[in-house]
Image: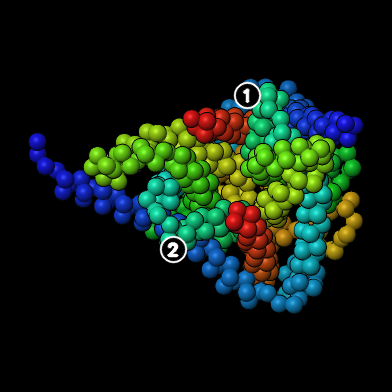
């Protein structure tokens, strides 16, 4: 029938357009990064200096800032996220408290990132500043540590929800068999559940890491915006995303703008890799 | 063999207690955030907040009418762009198998993972630069691109859940493929797709990063989509980073409005899902 053919053709065209859009996205980022790629080459990646006044741009301070905040956020959030996943995915048998916990994590995932930043600026920063004064560190309040704590709170729901789904994929008979043999819940969790879904949990953590890498607003508001290499965990710094947010509209030279776009390009590539690997692992688990 | 049951049971107890403590510890920051917003936000809520425009820096009073209208314009543009294309791509993914569909699925996941600030750069390069200035249109397009994967995935997943027998019955009665899709399959999945759209709106309503250099912000009321507009998240960002106490107060009020909006959208979306399953 004519209508059917037309409908299928339209679907294929839209699918083609979408793929083309993704290719163009990468292509435009690459094209606009060219001035900065040509000027600095590989040196851009390990250049320690970011100085718009003399048009000298190196990514290293922001790469380090991004990796430290994201890894620290993961270290803080994984114990909490894993506990929630095990509690909701394995131990709880429904009821009031698990429901509250489920709604709570959903709510945490739904709060906009700018509100996390705003809240952290007025609640978390003073607390950290107090702590720093007592510990005898320069009391900035803002800095890598504060940003990591906010990031950790933000990514807990992502890691816990993926891990929970993965834990639920463990066949019920395996768990029951373990329990029937006299194993305690701890032993079942350690020797049956976790080995079965290790790769899926790794994928969940990877996806949480991806979110932390690209998170912009909350980090921009509390990291202190310093363009030099961070000296300590409490020092102000910048991440790749936050430096773009801070400087993009103020960039006056072509090279400055192009260097910021190149940072965006690297963020795009980094996130694409992390996400695709995570998704492929989860897909493989679901098939199994 | 020595009997160590006691130790094993003790370990189990300790393990479970730790799990429960760590799980519910997460409620603490959530409570603190909601408490902070409600405590500081409620006092900022008054008629002026919704009906007045911002005052010049440092002057007390004023409202966020421009941001509320701006947010609505941006969301409207994003929905108009992402919903038709998203639903069509969702249909494509649920109906087709093979290498191209696999690649498309990976591309959708990739897009979902692209940081919002990078989407902002792309919208800047594609729309702001050619048009020669910041605009509501560019912001709406950025938000539309962000919403696209959410609509695609919810459509795909909903349509995959619809029993094949339903489609077979329609086709068996002699309905054409298009008719089957539009009169039988899509209506059956309507509530699922709608809840996906609502969740998508809830997600983009709070996005700030892609708007920084697209919609840009605007202290005046603007309905022209080729001119910059303000939005709720932008006003929260700009006011919270300002040194004025009165602007902080308004930022809390705006946060309260935004959180309530996101919550309500989430609740409606979930109600629909729930109705669909029963």
| Element under disc 2 | helix
Residue farthest along the left direction in this orientation: B1
- The residue under the point 76% across, 41% down is B170
Q: Nearer the viewer, residue A130 or A15?
A: A15
Q: Earlier in the sequence, mark 2 or mark 1?
A: 1
How many numbered dots are placed on residues in this image?
2
Q: Is residue B77 above or below residue B267?
A: above
Q: Position of residue B84 (x, y in %)?
A: 80, 44
Indicate the quadrant where residue B45 lies. bottom right
In the figure, is residue B140 to the left or right of A202?
right
In the figure, is residue B80 to the left or right of A273?
right
Q: Which mark is residue A96?
A: 2
- The residue under the point 52% across, 30% down is A287
Both marks 2 and 1 on one chain: yes
Distance (Cα) linking label 2 and label 1 = 56 Å
Q: Nearer the viewer, residue A149 or A95?
A: A95
Q: Is residue B195 visible?
A: yes
Q: Tell me the chain of label 2.
A: A
Q: Nearer the viewer, residue A245 or A288?
A: A288
Could you classify mark 1 by the number of other residues whose Cα lies within 10 Å: few (under 14), some (14-19), or many (20 or more)? some
């Amino acid at each position: 029938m004519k209508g059917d053919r037309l409908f299928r053709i339209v679907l294929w065209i839209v699918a083609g357009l979408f793929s083309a859009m993704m290719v163009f996205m990468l292509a435009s980022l690459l094209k606009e990064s060219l001035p900065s790629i040509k000027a600095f080459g590989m040196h851009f990646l390990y250049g320690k200096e970011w100085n718009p006044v003399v048009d000298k741009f190196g990514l290293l301070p922001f790469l380090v800032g991004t990796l430290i905040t994201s890894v620290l956020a993961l270290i803080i959030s994984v114990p909490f996220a894993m506990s929630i996943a095990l509690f909701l995915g394995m131990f709880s048998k429904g009821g009031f408290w698990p429901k509250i916990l489920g709604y709570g994590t959903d709510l945490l995932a739904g709060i906009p990132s700018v509100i996390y930043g705003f809240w952290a600026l007025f609640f978390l920063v003073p607390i950290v500043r107090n702590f720093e004064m007592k510990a005898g560190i320069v009391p900035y309040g803002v800095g890598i540590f504060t940003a990591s704590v906010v990031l950790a709170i933000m990514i807990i729901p992502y890691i816990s929800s993926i891990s929970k789904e993965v834990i639920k994929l463990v066949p019920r008979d395996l768990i029951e068999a373990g329990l029937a043999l006299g194993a305690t819940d701890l032993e079942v969790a350690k020797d049956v559940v976790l080995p079965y879904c290790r790769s899926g949990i790794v994928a969940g953590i990877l996806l949480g890491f991806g979110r932390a890498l690209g998170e912009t607003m909350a980090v921009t508001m509390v990291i202190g915006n310093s363009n030099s290499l961070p000296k300590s965990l409490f020092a102000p710094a910048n991440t790749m995303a936050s430096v773009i947010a801070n400087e993009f509209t103020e960039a006056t030279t072509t090279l400055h703008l192009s260097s910021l776009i190149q940072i965006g390009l690297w963020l795009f590539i980094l996130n694409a890799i992390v996400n695709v690997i995570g998704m492929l692992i989860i897909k493989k688990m679901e098939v199994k | 063999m020595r009997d160590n049951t006691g130790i094993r049971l003790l370990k189990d107890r300790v393990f479970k207690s730790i799990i429960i403590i760590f799980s519910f510890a997460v409620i603490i920051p959530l409570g603190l955030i909601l408490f902070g917003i409600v405590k500081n936000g409620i006092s900022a809520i008054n008629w002026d907040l919704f009906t007045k425009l911002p005052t010049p820096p440092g002057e007390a009073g004023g409202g966020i009418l421009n941001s509320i209208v701006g947010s609505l314009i941006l969301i409207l543009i994003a929905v108009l762009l992402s919903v038709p294309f998203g639903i069509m791509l969702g249909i494509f993914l649920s109906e087709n198998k093979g290498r191209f569909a696999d690649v498309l699925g990976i591309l959708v996941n990739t897009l979902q993972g692209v940081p919002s600030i990078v989407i902002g750069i792309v919208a800047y390069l594609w729309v702001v630069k050619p048009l020669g200035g910041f605009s509501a249109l560019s912001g709406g397009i950025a938000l539309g691109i962000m919403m696209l994967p959410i609509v695609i995935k919810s459509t795909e997943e909903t349509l995959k859940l619809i029993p094949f027998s339903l489609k077979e019955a329609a086709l068996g009665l002699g309905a054409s493929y298009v008719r089957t899709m539009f009169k039988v399959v899509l209506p059956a999945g309507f509530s699922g797709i709608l809840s996906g759209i609502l969740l998508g709106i809830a997600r983009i309503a709070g996005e700030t990063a892609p708007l920084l250099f697209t919609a840009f912000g605007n202290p005046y009321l603007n309905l022209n989509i080729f001119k910059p507009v303000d939005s709720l998240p932008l006003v929260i960002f700009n006011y919270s980073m300002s040194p004025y106490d009165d602007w902080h107060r308004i930022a809390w009020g705006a946060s309260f409005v935004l959180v309530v909006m996101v919550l309500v959208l989430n609740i409606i979306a979930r109600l629909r899902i729930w109705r669909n399953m029963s």
